[in-house]
Image: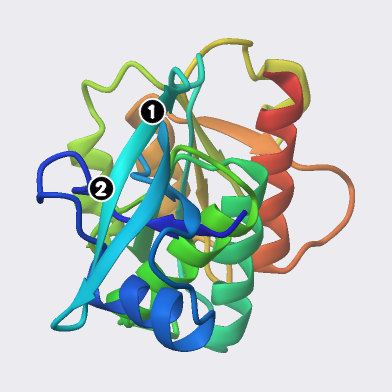
């Protein structure tokens, strides 16, 4: 059955938004009395029937709602977007399919990309959420500087990690220190990696240095590996 995304389906009188309406009526050519599924990205999936199409909005009626509770643990990746934006978008798509819950774009001292098209990224997240049949849509946070992000997370109860390339005898493998059923936050640096003073600042603020294995990974690969490790543990 076709799946559509409408975050306000419970409160907007039973209408799909304009973009989803276009896909439903103009692309898929669905008609009155056809059955569809709608997700709100907040744990619910609705079995619906198309009632009508009016002024670029598809009117539907909810026949049944099924709810899935939020996972016991959330994976939050804070990542410096890559210079080649397609590589960052690849990470966004694949991590959403795997089950990431939160993404924060980071501005670091070695960052080559200092902005992203948030609207486009949200569309990629929405598409991947529907593709993977996930009922929980990941949250995309605003672009934030490294130090500001650290400050925002001072009182956070998440397990907090920072992954980087340089040798450090205190680094542990993520798979050995990530606790089951805990929210996890992992910072991944830019192509040029975090600077040592950034690493030191993170460690001083209760971030644990970690390794993702003995391979040198690209930024987006490292972020996806970290996401997968957390999902496999939980």
Q: Nearer the viewer, residue 7 or 163?
A: 7
Image location of residue 51, percent across then percent down:
29, 59
Contact between marks 1 and 2 (CB within 8 A): the answer is no
Regarding mark 1 in the picture, which secondary structure is present there? strand
Image location of residue 116, percent across then percent down:
34, 80
Q: Earlier in the sequence, mark 1 or mark 2?
A: 1
Look at 19% across and 51% down and name the residue there. 14
Q: Is residue 67 left or right of residue 139?
A: right
Of circles 1 and 2, the one toward us is 1
Q: Which mark is residue 149?
A: 2
Image location of residue 182, percent across then percent down:
51, 14
Regarding mark 2 in the picture, which secondary structure is present there? helix
**Residue 188 position (above or below residue 174):** below
For the view shown, which residue lies furthest in the right direction? 214
Look at 28% across and 42% down and name the residue there. 150
Separation of residues labelled 1 and 2 (CA atoms): 37 Å
Q: Nearer the viewer, residue 200 or 212?
A: 212
Image coloring type: rainbow
Residue 186 seen by the camera = yes
Q: Which mark is residue 65?
A: 1
Look at 62% across and 12% down and name the residue there. 179
**Where does the C terminus fall, quadrant-wise?**
top right
**Residue 12 position (above or below residue 209):** below
Q: Nearer the viewer, residue 5 or 209?
A: 5
Q: Residues within 10 Å of mark 2 (few under 14, many from 20)?
A: some
Q: Is residue 25 left or right of residue 150?
A: right
Q: Residues within 10 Å of mark 1 (few under 14, many from 20)?
A: few
**Residue 71 position (above or below residue 33):** above
Q: Is residue 211 left or right of residue 52?
A: right
Look at 68% across and 30% down and name the residue there. 231
**Residue 229 position (above or below residue 200):** above
């Amino acid at each position: 059955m076709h799946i559509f995304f409408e975050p306000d389906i419970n409160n907007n009188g039973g209408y799909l938004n304009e973009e989803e309406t276009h896909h439903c009526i103009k692309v898929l050519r669905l008609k009155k009395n056809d059955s569809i599924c709608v997700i709100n990205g907040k744990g619910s999936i609705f079995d619906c029937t198309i009632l009508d199409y009016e002024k670029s909005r598809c009117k539907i009626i909810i026949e049944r709602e099924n709810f899935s509770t939020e996972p016991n643990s959330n994976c939050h990746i804070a990542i410096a977007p890559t210079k080649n934006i397609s590589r960052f978008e690849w990470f966004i798509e694949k991590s959403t399919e795997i089950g990431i819950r939160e993404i924060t774009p980071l501005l670091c001292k070695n960052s080559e990309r200092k902005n992203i098209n948030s609207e486009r990224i949200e569309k990629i997240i929405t598409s991947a959420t529907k593709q993977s049949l996930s009922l929980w849509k990941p949250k995309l946070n605003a672009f934030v500087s490294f130090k500001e992000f650290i400050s925002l997370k001072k009182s956070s109860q998440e397990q907090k990690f920072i992954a980087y390339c340089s040798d450090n005898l205190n680094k542990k493998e993520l798979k050995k220190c990530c606790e089951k059923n805990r929210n996890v936050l992992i910072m991944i640096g830019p192509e040029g990696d975090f600077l040592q003073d950034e690493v030191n600042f993170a460690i001083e603020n209760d971030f644990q240095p970690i390794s993702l294995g003995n391979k040198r990974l690209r930024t987006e690969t490292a972020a996806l590996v970290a996401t997968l490790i957390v999902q496999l543990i939980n």
